[in-house]
Structures are given as structure tokens and as C-alpha cells.
Amino acid sequence: MARKKEREVPEINASSMADIAFLLLIFFLVTTTMDIDKGILVTLPPYVPNQEEIDVKIKQKNVLEILVNAKDQLLVEGEIMDVKELKELAIKHVDNNGRDPDFSDSPQDAVVSLQNDKGTSYNRYIEVYNEVRAAYNDLRNKKSQSKFGVNYNDLSKDQQREIRDIYPLKLSEADPTDFGNEK
Amino acid sequence: MFRKKGGKKTPKISTASLPDIVFMLLFFFMVVTVMRETEQLVNVKYPKATELQKLEKKSLVSSIYIGKPTPKYTEKFGTAPRIQLNDAFADKEDIISFIQDERSQLDEKLQNKMTTSLKVDQDVKMGIITDVKKELRKAGALKINYSAVQRGGDN
């Protein structure tokens, strides 16, 4: 009681607080997988109730026909093919400009037709879709590099449209076959 | 009442750590709120792809999960792939009303920007996906996204 001064409560050393906070922060940073949704963006064609057979005359040579069966095998233009070769062939097909009579007349005319079976796995479907997308992305990038000197994704909206008009992605998806169930 | 000489000063509580605590809480909540708000009823292992695009606005995205029911639900629903909308299993007939419901929650100007994210397991067969796509087309939800992960990256 006599010596009050000595009984002052000592200050708690808070300098380690920051360390603890950082530790927790780093812990959460490492452990959380930020759930950013990524994927392949697709625009579907609008639904037409009674789909009449509209005869759209497309020259056979302008169509790159991709068929996938229930066993996940690919048939491209009548030939069995591996998915890895698809991108190159798609580029060749689209960017043909009439050179090879088996492929498209021009990129604007080129159509990719994709048909799968009901038994095709989603994985294979995405792979095929991805390869076609990759082919077009490659072509668009190349074009935008030569024209604007930057990649397609870095262009302004109008410039992107310009490139897109040169290489329009025309992908037609036919109704799936149903041979997978016959066994 | 009495002034004790020297005074029994109330010790100052150090507030130096306060910002740290606040930051800690902030980070914690940041981390927690990112986590998905719906319980996963089906197992989804995303397919791998390279040409990925990010989905920008989360509020404009509604998700449809398709995959095998998780072990908890296999007894009840079997192992055949099922569709999950929000928190419940659904049939493909429910998709149209689901889309309309999601759309009505959006601002009118943004309604045509709505994207439907298909979170489909890589082993699911295309039959069910084609059906879902047809329903989406009927519902007018034409912008869709096939969720996938970057090939070569770790999950």
C-alpha cells in the first residue's frame, strides 16, 4: 500500500499480434481454393418448337464433320482420328481459302458440325469442343497479331468483332445418335 | 474522493493490436463468404480444358450440377447421375421453372446477360446433358458455360 507506483499494470507486449494475424492470413490464403468459375462459354441456338427441315444448302466441302460415338472414338470427315490431331485439322479446314478442294472455301463459309452419341462421355465432348475452340482462338490470335500486334483478348470490343467476322465460329450441333444403348 | 498522491492511474490498454484484430476478422469473413452457399448433393469432377474463360459477374450466374449423388445420398437415389438445382435433386422438367425463377430475381436490364453454368462431372454421358441443353433452350437461357478446370494445373 505504501508504494503505489510499483504496482502499475505492465503493458502487454502487442508486437507479436501482427505476426499472429499474418500467420492466420497466410493459413487461409493457402488453404482456400478460391472458387472462381471458369469454363467454356457457349451460346445455344434458340429453341424452335417444330423444327422443320430447313434446307440450308451448305457445300459438303465447307463442313468439317466430327462424329463421336459411345465409345468416345472420333470420326472426322470419315476417318478415325485422335483428339490431339483435331485442332490442326480444324485450322487447316477453316483457313483453307479454297486451296484444298476437300476443305472450306473461306473462313466465313466454314462450318464445324459436331454430332455425338447419347453414350459419349462429357469429358470427351468437352475435349472435342475445346479443340475446336482452340483452333479458332489460334486463328483469331494470329490475325489480331498481324493486324493489331496484340492478342485477341487484349483488343477492344470493336476490334474483336472485326476479327470475329473474319473467323466466325460456326459450330452446329446435331441431335445425338442413340446407338450407345444397343448392345 | 481522496486524491492519493501519485494517483492510481488506470493503465492504458494498448490499442496497437486493434487494427490487426480487425484485419484478421476481415480476412476471415472474406475467406468464408467466397465458399459456396449450397450444399453439394452430387459429386462433380470437372473435365479439363485449355480454352477457358472466366465468368465475370457472380450474381448473373446460376449453376446446374449434374453428377453421381454423394455417398450420403446413394442409398436413396442410386448411383445414376442426377441433376441438382439449388439445394435439391431435380428432374429435367424442373429446369424451365428454375431458370424463370433465377431470371426473375435479376434486374430487367441484366436478364439477357444471365449465364447458366453447367457443372457436370466428366463421366456423365451426353444423353442427360443434351436433354438439359434442350430444356435450357426452351427456357431461353442461351448463354451457358461448361465449367472446366485448366489442363495441366492442379485441380
Image: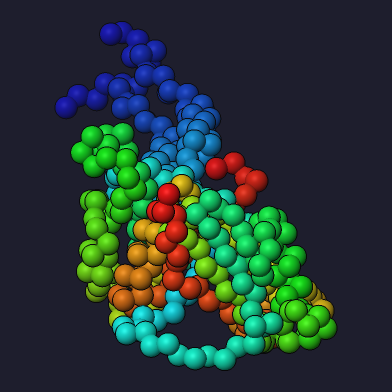
In the picture, the quarter occupied by the C terminus of chain B is top right
Against A35, residue A143 (above or below) is: below
Residue B73 placed where, x, y %? 25, 38
Q: Is residue A72 left or right of residue B120?
A: right
Against A18, residue B136 (above or below) is: below
Q: Is residue B123 left or right of residue A167?
A: left
Residue drawn at x 35%, y 71% is: B134
Against A157, residue B127 (above or below) is: above
Residue drawn at x 61%, y 72% is: A65
Q: Give the residue at the far front of this rendering.
A: A183
In the picture, the quarter occupied by the N terminus of chain B is top left
Residue A70 placed where, x, y %? 50, 54
Q: Is residue A17 left or right of residue A99?
A: left
Residue drawn at x 83%, y 83% is: A99
Q: Mark yes or no: residue B84 visible.
A: yes
In the depicted view, which residue is nearer to us: A12 or B9? A12
Residue A67 placed where, x, y %? 57, 65
In the depicted view, which residue is nearer to us: B100 or A98? A98
Q: Give the residue at the far left of this rendering.
A: B1
In the depicted view, which residue is nearer to us: A59 or A160? A59
Number of callouts: 0
Residue drawn at x 76%, y 73% is: A92
Which image quadrant is residue B27 in? top left
In the depicted view, which residue is nearer to us: A118 or A107? A118
Residue A140 placed where, x, y %? 71, 75
Q: Mark yes or no: residue A156 visible.
A: no
